[in-house]
Image: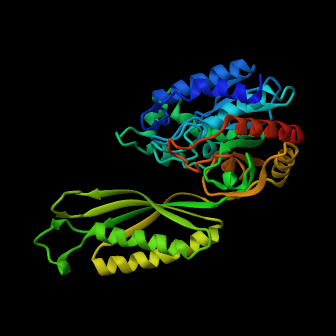
Amino acid sequence: MTIAAALARRLEGLVPIGLGPQGTTRLAWTPELAQAEAWFAAQAADVGLEVQRDPAGSLWACPPPPAPWWGVGSHLDSVRDGGRHDGALGVAAGFEIAARSEGLPLAVLAFTDEEGARFNTPTFGSRALVGRLDVADALARTDDEGVTLADAMAGAGVDPGGLAGAPAWLDRLRGFVELHIDQTRDLEVAGAPVGVVRALASRRRLRIDVEGHADHAGTTRGADRHDALAAAARVIVAAGELAAGELEMVATASRIVVEPNAFTTVPRHVRLWLDARAPSGDALDAWRRALDAHAAEVAAAGGVQVAILVEAGSAGVVFDGAVRDALAVAALRAGAGVADLLCYAGHDAGVIGERLPAGMLFVRNPTGVSHAPQEEVAVEDAAIGVQVMVDALRTLA
């Protein structure tokens, strides 16, 4: 069976799980994710690997040779109403890579809660593995229904009391490589089916609370207003304008909650989240200083209070040179591919890359759309990615 046909067969069992009219929803610690984990177990059995679950809930399909192994894979969870291939393609490809890498010590991994869509805990499994997860904070977080992450873990059969022990599993890995759908049109524009990622950009997620006073929307004169939403809007606009002044930086107001959110009431409180990304941490630091100064001016002018805190972030990572070279040579040998991509998304491979040799290979996405049903990938392009990964791992191992 060709790689493309075999990969399509593997995906057939995974893609329908959590698929609805608006896209794919497989959140962490849910029945939909449990179905995907059952698929994972079946795939592991198909290639003769033993499934184990680490203390963070991530799944490992382990080979008979003793650790350490090279790891391949990605994640099975999704955002709400997301695409079919984000994460899923990398795990399915991991099993096909293992099937075609006889004799190589490879483990296939599905990291828990990479998206962080339910508890705002992105790259949960990989951060737990490298010891960069604030365990107490994570376990106390709640979803939209008020369920704590600790209770959700327990309900899924994972002991939250063992979470702090996840870093002990890192010694099982020699390194990690991840195949992932391109989340831009870069490869489509380049006419290349695959591309080697040089680095992941620095990222920061800010939570901003604006506190004003509720009052009547009609009777409150301008000088007497303490409008939290108007002040928040000015902060949002400033965040985008300040980011535009930094080369290749982007800032997004990704979520906003308004209270009391009533038609005839001046908003009392706003909580919003800003997602900022840049090629370097220095650029993010400069942007944050400028944003703090502007927020202070907005607060003074509007008679409100503005508090800004960092809720999540990553300094970014440059992937291991030997891993990048192995992937680039294998792509060249396959007659397809480009090197030196800069990725603005966060990935488990980037977290692992802080501690171990790691790398990423992107597969062309003609639409460039990500985290939405319109994302697309041709199984023939993914098959080239599988072959490139197999060849590169033979070199690395």
Residue drawn 33% across the image and 66% down it: 210
Q: Would residue 172 be seen by someone viewing this image from the given angle?
A: no
Residue 229 screen position, x and y as percent: 29, 66
Residue drawn 71% across the image and 42% down it: 178
Side of 349 relative to 14 (left or right): right
Side of 263 relative to 374 (left or right): left
Residue drawn 39% across the image and 68% down it: 307
Please tell me how many numbered marks the rendered image carries.
Answer: 0
Quarter holding residue 203: bottom right
Side of 387 relative to 54 (left or right): right
Residue 145 screen position, x and y as percent: 34, 39
In this rendering, is residue 111 above or below 244? above
Image quadrant where one finds the N terminus: top right
Toward the viewer: 91 or 61? 91
Q: What is the basis of the colouring in this image?
A: rainbow
Residue 366 screen position, x and y as percent: 62, 47
Side of 69 relative to 25 (left or right): right
Q: Would residue 263 be seen by someone viewing this image from the given angle?
A: yes
Toward the viewer: 296 or 262? 262
In this rendering, is residue 167 above or below 103? below
Image quadrant where one finds the C terminus: top right
Toward the viewer: 72 or 206? 72
State the residue lying farthest toward the left.
219
Residue 259 screen position, x and y as percent: 26, 58
In this rendering, is residue 323 above or below 108? below
Quarter holding residue 60: top right
